[in-house]
Image (tube, grey):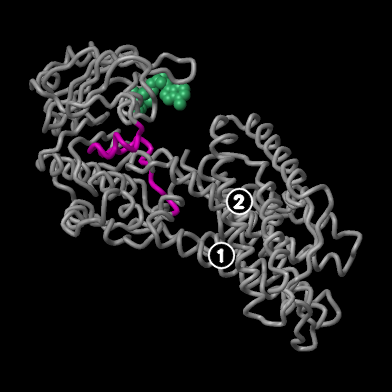
Amino acid sequence: MSAAPDHRPTFARAGLSDRLAPWLPLLLVPLLMVFGWLAIPSTSSWLTLTVSGLAMGMMIFLMASGLTLVFGLMDVINFGHGAFISLGAFVGVSVLLALASWTAAASLPLNLAALGLALVAAVLVTGTMGWLFERVIVRPVYGAHLKQILVTMGGLIVAEQLILVIWGPAQIFITRPEMLKGAVTFAGAALEKYRLVAVALGLIVFLAMRLVLRHSRIGLIVRAGVQNGEMVQALGYRLRLVFIGTFVAGSALAGLGGVMWGLYDEVITADMGASLMVLVFIVVIIGGLGSVEGCFLGALLVGLVQNYAAFLEPKLAMVSNIALLVAVLMWRPEGMMAVVKSK
Amino acid sequence: MSDPILTLKGVHTDIGRYHILQGVELEVPRGGVTMLLGRNGVGKTTTLRTVMGLWRARAGQITFDGRDVTALPTAAIARAGIGFVPEDMGIFTDLTVEENLILAAASGPLSSDRLDRIFAAFPPLKTFWKSAAGNLSGGQKQMLSIARAMAEERRLYLIDEPTKGLAPAIVATMAAALRDLKAEGAAILLVEQNFAVARLLGDSCAVMDDGRVIWSGPMAELAADTALQERLMGLSLEAP
Ligand SMILES: Nc1ncnc2c1ncn2[C@@H]1O[C@H](COP(=O)(O)OP(=O)(O)OP(=O)(O)O)[C@@H](O)[C@H]1O
Ligand SMILES: [Mg+2]
């Protein structure tokens, strides 16, 4: 055996299109906005619709981000995720109703304090429920997709019935805190204050998630685990604990999204979570299973497409998201930012 | 070798409905390189994965450093001091080289001393420190996979075919790195198809066939006996 000759390592230079490919999905959101601007005759309605689409997208992102990581990490399909959306909404709205004097006051700090408390309560309750759900319902069915679908659907039904038992069968109406009602005018467009709050909250959560996933050890473990869970364990990490943590965090975020959505619609029902899950699944699939960035972009696309379509061709609004799903999957069958699985 | 670091006694492993390991008996002495040889599909990879707890032994006992690890979770086995380099390398391709190595040091920050040793053995890892590991060439990925195992103090390395599919120049780099690892005094259980490398590095040797260890003894003895090689592995592995 001879000594190793010097060898200068080099990357195989990928072609320009190959190197740009991962970034293409990032362009879709601005492209869609430009398309909307061209198609919608008045700039002020375009601005209103865009903000409303982004707000909707951000809320869907809150609900979907946990689900995509749960699927990526442990290959678990959780149809019960919608339960946390509904539960979060009911808990949060109950807190807001109890703090009626704070929400009715014309004071922004009091209003935000009430909203903050509602969000915290929803997060605590749905996080705890998530922990229970993982233990009781999900854990026995690891590795068996069909059982997961059936059992988590069952969990969803039980959770909805529990909500009906606790809060009664009637839908609950809720008005937004005083200072978050109405709109601000910007460049001639009416922008609802609450939607701006939703956009800001979604953006904060997304950036915080990115920070954790990119720059903390636990984030590294999650990202590595989505790719190759076995190897993460073989390096000495208990993937199960990481998964439980992710499941709890995902459930809590769904609860957060539920409160925000409840205030957006100004009415909540026990089955709101189940009906939102259609959008959530579309977002998770077009984003690429296991990718938080993909999920974020997917959610914004879904929100914008739905709002533009509702304005341009109301009859098409219902099917616009399915059309988006089909288009994305024809372009990238694994979703926009699919995670490369090693196993 | 009265006190081996790793002992497998009568280990049986099933994969699905298949009975793959059929009573593996294996001892890995402290210090030195033990080669695990055998034709394709005889159960070498399965043996390493069973030690790591990635497949579960249905029967038998695995002892690491005097401790029964047969039923421990994979993470606990790793933390007991075993570095694993799987056959498919198990690189986290979306993570950078740096992030792969940070993760590999599970019990604390990567020490600069170890990092220097890794860079000395595998200079390309320094060059591509901040790049996504998925962009590395096959040989560089293999280097990263071994470097990950070196990121912490280990008492045993399980390394599965580190020279698979590599150009001869890189095989030599790899062999040199493994020799340095051996010089540090850790025990290595090495699966290797390249007989030249096996002969260079191996101190002792176990040959598998059909889910069992059918021969074990000093590497030199096997290397010197072409007829024995023929009988155990069905072909002469004498280097051309
Ligand atoms: N995931 C699996 N499912 C089913 N059978 C498997 C699986 N993994 C391995 N086997 C079977 O187990 C047997 C032993 O495989 P193993 O990978 O341990 O062999 P090996 O000695 O490492 O071979 P090679 O030299 O080709 O790497 C083979 O017959 C293989 O087909
Ligand atoms: Mg093998």
Residue B234 visible in the displayed image: no
Chain of the residue that carries numbered disc 2 in the rendered image = A
Question: From the viewer's perspective, is A132 left or right of B77?
Answer: right
At a point 69% along the width and 57% down the height, the residue shown is A258
In space, the residues marked 1 and 2 are separated at their CA atoms by 19 Å
Q: Quadrant of residue A79?
A: top right
The spot of residue B112 in percent (x, y) is 19, 59
Q: Are marks 1 and 2 in contact (CB under 8 Å)?
A: no
Question: From the viewer's perspective, is B30 left or right of B213?
Answer: left
Write down the region rendered in magenta. Answer: B73-94
N-terminal-most mark, 1 or 2: 2
Question: Which secondary structure, mark 1?
Answer: helix
Please say whether residue A97 is one of the residues in the magenta stretch. Answer: no
For mark 2, what is the residue? A126
At a point 76% along the width and 72% down the height, the residue shown is A35
The spot of residue A290 in percent (x, y) is 55, 49
For mark 1, what is the residue? A206
